[in-house]
Image: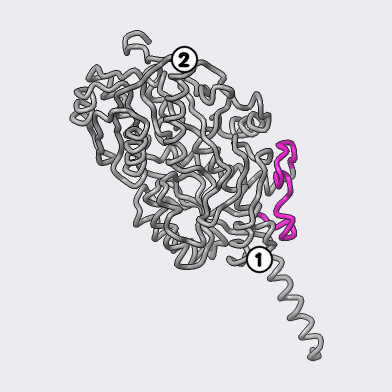
Amino acid sequence: MTSPLRTLALLAALLLSVRASAQEEIRIGVIYPLTGAAASTGIELKNAAQLAADLINGTDKSLGLPLAGAGGLPGLKGAKIKLIFVDHQGNPQVGASEAERLITEHKVAAIQGAYFSTVTTTASQVAERNGVPFLNADSSSPALTQRGFKWFFRTTPHDELFVQNAFEFLRDLKAKKGIQVKRIAIFAENTEFGTGAAKLQERYAKENGYEVVEKVLYPPKGTQLTSEVQKLKASRPDIVMQSSYLGDAILSMKTYKDLGFLPTALLANNAGFNDSEFLKTMGKDGNYVISREVWALDLGVKKPVIAKANALLQARHGVNFNGNSARAFTGVFALADAINRAGSTKPEAIQKALQETNIPGADLIMPWGGIQYDATGQNTKGAGIIVQVQDGKYATVWPFDLASKDVIWPMPAWDKR
C-alpha cells in the first residue's frame, strides 16, 4: 500500500514533468495568405518565418544574431518555438476566425501576421479582445497603430514613413540629378492598404507642390484593369505612384504594355512589386520599376549578416529574401526575443517584455536603427530605402549614400528592353 507521502511525491513529480513538457514547446500562431491571389507571397512569408524559428531552435551559431543557434529559448530552459500556420485566404473574416481558433484551440502564446492590412485589422481585434500579444511584421497601414490597442506591436515602418521617403527621393532627384517631376497619378487597390497609402500620397504631393492629375482606386482581384489604365494614360502623368498586391501588380503591368502606357517612372508601394513571383512572371517587362523597400540583398556588402541570412534561405528554398520575407523573419526574432526575456508564456509577461524591447540595429538583418516600440506599439527605429529593378534584380538606388546603382530615369520604352 502506497504511503500518503509517497503519493504526494509522485504527484509532485508528475506535475513537474507536465510543466517541463509544456515548456518544451512555445506555440506561436502565424496568419498568412497561403491560398488565393497572394499565395506565393504567403508561402515566402511562411518559409522565412519557419527559417527564423528553426535557427532559434537549432545550434548553428554561424549567423551571428542573438538567439540564432541557442537551441531554444534560454529564458525558458531551452523551450522550442513551434509556429502554427493558418491561411486567411486574403479574407478579413477568415483571418478573424483563424485568430480565434489559434487562441481557443491551439492556446498560442502570441500571434504574428497577417500581411494584408485588412486582415491584420480584424485578426488583431480578436487578439486584443482576448488579451493575446499580436506582432505585425509586414502590414503598413498607419491606422493599425492608431486604435489605442495595448496588445498590438508592429516592427515594420508604416506607409506615412514610406510616402515621406518617396517625396524625399523626388526632392533628391531634383537637387542632385536635375530630374524634375511635376505631374503625379495615384493608382491603388481600394482596401485598407491602398486607400490609406493613396490618401497620404495625395496629401504629400499637394504639400510639396506637385499636381495630382488623377487618382484611381480599383477593386482588387479583378480580371481586367483596362478602363482604369486608360484613365491613367489620359491624365499624362510624369510618374505613377502605385499600391497593389501581387496579382494586380502583374495584371496592371501587362495592361500598361498592352495599351502602350509608359510614364517616365513607376514608383510602387512595395507589396506585389517586390514579390519574387513578380519578376518571374514579368521577365524583362518588370525591369525599371522603382519601389519603396525595407530590405535589399545588395546591402549585404555593408552589412554581412544580410548576405549570410540570404544564403541560408537560398540553400533551403532557392530564392532570395525580399522586403516581405525579411520582415517576416525579423518578426519571429523580435517576438522570440520578448518571450525569452519574459521567461514565461503568460500574455501579460510577453506584453511587458514587448513594451520594453530595445533591439539594436546590429542584431537585425534589416537596415534599421533597431526595434523599440512607442506607446502605440509602433517601432520607432524602422527605416525605408528605395530600390529599382535593373537586369532582373532589385538594386538600392536611394538613399544615395547607400545606393549600389544609379537610378535609370526615364524608363526605357517597352520595345527598347
**Magenta span: chief secondary structure:** loop
The secondary structure type at the circle numbered 2 is helix
Residue 186: give x, y in percent of width and height: 30, 32
Residue 361 appears in which quarter of the rendering?
Answer: top right
- Tell me the kind of residue under disc 1: Ala
Which residues are drawn in magenta? 60-80
Residue sitting at 65 percent across and 50 percent down? 358
Locate the C terminus and report the quarter of the image it occupies. Answer: top left
The secondary structure type at the circle numbered 1 is helix
Name the residue carrying label 1.
22
Relative height, residue 236 to residue 193 (above, below): above
Locate the N terminus and report the quarter of the image it occupies. Answer: bottom right
Relative height, residue 402 to residue 352 (above, below): above
Closer to the camera in the image, 175 or 359: 175
Say whether marks 1 and 2 touch (CB < 8 Å): no
Name the residue carrying label 2.
177
Relative height, residue 409 to residue 122 (above, below): above
Left or right: residue 333 compared with residue 266: right
Residue 316: give x, y in percent of width and height: 60, 34
The numbered disc on residue 289 is none
Is 61 part of what is drawn in magenta? yes
Real-space CA distance between mark 1 and mark 2, rounded to the nearest whole angstrom: 60 Å
Residue 340 appears in which quarter of the rendering?
Answer: bottom right
Is 407 part of what is drawn in magenta? no
Rate crowding at label 1 as few (under 14), some (14 to 19) or many (20 or more) other CA atoms within 10 Å. few
Residue sitting at 29 percent across and 18 percent down? 262
